């Protein structure tokens, strides 16, 4: 790394599917990035986006990667394509920021980081939700010693399955998908942000059905094969010694458990859903009889998907962005290790590590918007 990022950074998006609309809503309030082009294997999807966004060109995928105006590619393709697209972007000398997970496997992801390091380009990766006020206010509470020494955490994500709302849910039920690789990035990124990197894991996993039925869109009623586990639970042993218990499931109807709780020697925190940017952080310390809501004290206020790009664009040269490739790689490594532990029935040492990303000071939306 070291190549300066001039702002506004010109962005080209590859992958115009379900999630792009959330990014398109955010771009107008980010003054450090500017969308200039879109592409998709299905060119009509790119054309439809360009038609609704003056100044944005619909290009072929290779054309966008080669385009002189594009400085960073936002990779919103499906997980199986993340690494291949990222490598092509890096080979063209451009920065890349991908949707999660960084790649379908940690081997592929390692190739992406190695290629980027050799090319001197920056890799960023979702989730950027953990840069919002929810996770960051909890981070501030821990850093300010409001719960004493952190001892443990519980992370719970359960749903009956994404096939109920996603028109093309196939990838969620194939290797590289499943509840852990799909939703785990939010939880593991939050846990690393709050408690630091993970040293080892123990996991167990199962699946209840071999097919799922699409519930919406033109393919409603169609059956999708399930070739990956759809319920994963496990324990993450952080380098600090703290223990996080994780339950990620596409096989449960509902829960009343908090998405994320952090327990310290002298206090407990309820942390909002790490798949959201904001939400109340609640604290209860020894002797308290009730939970109290903490005032918002850190993070990008009013943010939404894409804030990680702004953060990356403003990161000093040579510095890892907060929603950076190394955190995404470690999160993927942790999740893969959990699945390997489930397969082998043994504890697995996580070979990678990463810096706990820098805390985000409270930043109001007005500080982001272009004048
Ligand atoms: N849908 C969501 O709510 C959501 C939320 C958060 C994150 N994500 C992540 O965003 C990514 C995309 O998810 P989605 O729901 O938008 O998927 P999607 O299937 O709706 O869209 C993916 C798009 O990428 C295109 N594409 C696939 N391979 C390509 C390639 N090699 N080159 C160019 N285009 C290619 C497809 O044609 C499609 O238009 C995934 O990594 C997913 O985990 C999705």
Image (tube, helix red, strand yellow):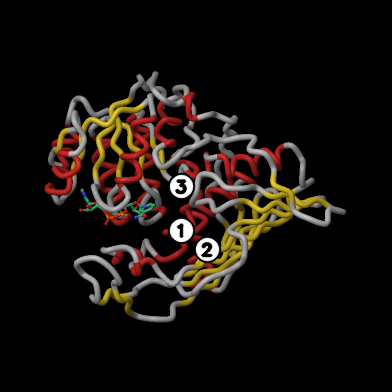
Residue 314 spot, x, y in % from top left: 44, 24
Label 2 with label 1: CB-CB less than 8 Å: yes
Residue at 61 percent across and 53 percent down: it is: 199
Residue at the location (21% across, 35% down)? Answer: 53
Ranked by sequence position, the earlier of labels 3 and 1 is 1
Identify residue for label 1.
Answer: 183
- CA gap, disc 2 to disc 1? 8 Å
The mark found on residue 329 in the picture is 3
Residue 334 horizontal side relative to residue 103, left or right? right
Q: CA distance from mark 3 to mark 1?
A: 15 Å
Which mark is on residue 98?
none
From the viewer's side, name the closer residue of 262 and 217: 217
Q: Earlier in the sequence, mark 2 or mark 3?
A: 2
Percent position (x, y) of residue 366? Answer: 48, 25
**Mark 2 residue element:** strand
Out of 327 and 49, give the one closest to the viewer. Answer: 49
Left or right, 296 with reference to 61 = right
Q: Indicate whether 332 appears above or below 97.
A: below
Which tag is nearer the camera, tag 3 or tag 1? 1
- Disc on the earlier residue, 2 or 1: 2
Query: Which residue position holds label 2?
Result: 157
Give the percent coordinates (x, y) of residue 352. 53, 48
Q: Are marks 3 and 1 in contact (CB under 8 Å)?
A: no
Q: Residues within 10 Å of mark 1 (few under 14, many from 20)?
A: many
* Element carrying mark 1: helix
């Amino acid at each position: 790394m070291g190549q300066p990022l001039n702002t506004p950074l010109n962005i080209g998006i590859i992958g115009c599917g379900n999630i792009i609309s959330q990014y398109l809503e955010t771009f107008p309030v980010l003054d450090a990035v500017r969308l200039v082009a879109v592409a998709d294997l299905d060119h009509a999807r790119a054309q439809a986006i360009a038609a609704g966004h003056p100044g944005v060109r619909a290009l072929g995928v290779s054309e966008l990667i080669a385009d002189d105006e594009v400085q960073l590619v936002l990779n919103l393709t499906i997980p199986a394509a993340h690494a291949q697209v990222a490598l092509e972007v890096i080979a063209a000398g451009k920065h890349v920021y991908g949707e999660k997970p960084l790649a379908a496997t940690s081997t592929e992801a390692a190739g992406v980081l190695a290629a980027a390091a050799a090319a001197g380009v920056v890799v960023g990766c979702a989730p950027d939700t953990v840069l919002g006020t929810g996770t960051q206010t909890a981070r501030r509470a821990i850093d300010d010693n409001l719960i004493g020494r952190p001892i443990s955490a519980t992370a719970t994500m359960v749903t009956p399955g994404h096939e109920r709302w996603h028109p093309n849910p196939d990838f969620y039920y194939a290797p590289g998908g499943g509840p852990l690789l799909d939703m785990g990035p939010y939880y593991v990124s939050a846990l690393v942000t709050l408690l630091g990197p993970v040293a080892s894991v123990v996991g167990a996993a199962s699946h209840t059905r071999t097919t799922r039925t699409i519930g919406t869109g033109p393919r409603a009623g169609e059956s999708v094969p399930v070739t990956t586990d759809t319920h994963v639970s496990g324990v993450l042993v952080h380098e600090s010694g703290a223990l996080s218990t994780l339950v990620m499931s596409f096989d449960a109807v509902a829960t009343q458990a908090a998405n994320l709780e952090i327990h310290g020697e002298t206090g407990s925190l309820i942390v909002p859903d790490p798949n959201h940017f904001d939400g109340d952080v609640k604290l209860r310390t020894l002797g308290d009889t009730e939970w109290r809501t903490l005032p918002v004290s850190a993070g990008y206020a009013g943010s939404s998907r894409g804030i990680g790009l702004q953060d990356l664009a403003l990161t000093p040269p040579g510095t890892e962005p907060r929603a950076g490739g190394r955190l995404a790689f470690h999160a993927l490594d942790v999740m893969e290790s959990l699945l390997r532990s489930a397969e082998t029935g043994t504890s697995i040492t996580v070979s990678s590590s990463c810096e706990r990303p820098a805390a985000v000071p409270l930043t109001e939306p007005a500080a982001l918007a272009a004048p």
